[in-house]
Amino acid sequence: MRHSLKIRHPGTAVRYLFMVLISLLFLFPFYWMLRTSVMPLDDIFEIPIVYFPREIQLEPYTAAFTVFPLLRYLFNSLFITILSTIGAVLTSSLCAFGFSRIAWKGRETVFTIVLSSMLLPSAVTLIPTFLGWSALGFSDTYVPLIVPYWFGGGAMNIFLLRQFFRTIPKALDESALIDGAGFLRIYARIILPLSKPVMIVVMLFAFMQSWNDFLNPIIYLNTQDSYTLSIGLQLFMTAYQTSWNQLMAAAVVSVAPCVLLFALGQRYIVEGINLTGMKG
């Protein structure tokens, strides 16, 4: 007895096929970077193009760390990014808690002003901010790269967290207040444990913003030993522009933390952003 195979939902199959093709299109540059980083230099420019390495070599990675202080730049970037991410998540969640769970006069007006700050281009405040930090004596230090994340964490992060916090029933706060809990205890014991998805989203956004930042480090940092990985890659490209396999190896090292974090937290990104729109 023959059973004919029928596609019950051809539209779904077409959508999945389209998404797979788009994903391959976006992943191809990452594959090309990885492929170039493990190939001999002669094979990179061979015609016809070699799409798959004939042999995988790790020498470009070891060379990238030995001919250039890449490890030092990697440590500097991790130091700045970790402290910045902690500050962004902590302070933006505290601000969002105040805007969503505590009633105070002028709350909506202040929140509107905070949101309006996103309309101001960063280039407008670049020179005044630099002059301010220089006047305080923090030029060529990590302070201007870390401390701003500890003062609110960014308007976008505050907005995302506020929208999510407003989906949590207010009855939980009222019950805790009746039991004698203060606002900080409500924030730490009730709100934060229920906000795992959006907290991870904010953490990922803050990490990638600080990790990929090139403009601020190149403005504030003057000593080469204090450079971040983003500046180090530019210096590497200038000094060893013909060593494409080593350059791509350094680029893989730079991209790997962001890719790893995104792979670990991708489901929370969709869940967190979806839930922030459940309540206005």
Image (cartoon, rainbow, N blue to C red):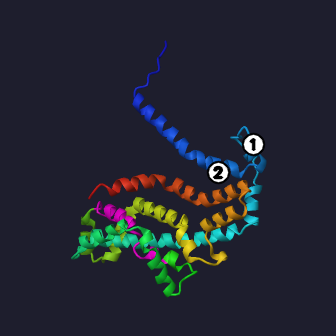
Horizontal arrangement in the rendering, residue 246 relative to residue 159 (left or right): right
Q: Which residue is mark 2?
A: 33
The quadrant the C terminus occupies is bottom left
Specify start and end residues of the magenta stretch as a single range: 147-168
Question: SS class of the residue under badge 1?
Answer: loop
Q: Is residue 192 visible?
A: no
| Disc nearer the start of the sequence (2/1) | 2
Give the label, 2 or 1, closer to the camera: 1
Q: Is residue 222 visible?
A: yes
Question: SS class of the residue under badge 2?
Answer: helix
**Residue 174 spot, x, y in % from top left:** 24, 70
Which residue extends farthest bottom? 136
Task: Kindly identify the amino acid type of the residue bearing the numbered disc 2.
Answer: Met
Horizontal arrangement in the rendering, residue 263 relative to residue 273 (left or right): right
Q: Which residue is mark 1?
A: 46
Q: Residue at x 64, y 64 (%)?
A: 234
- Decide: few, some or many residues near mark 2? Use Cα within 10 Å; few <14, some 14-19, many ≥20: some
In this view, the residue in front, 233 or 30, is 233
Q: Residue at x 51, y 62 (%)?
A: 208
Horizontal arrangement in the rendering, residue 243 relative to residue 173 (left or right): right
Q: Is residue 240 magenta?
A: no
In this view, the residue in front, 13 or 155, is 155
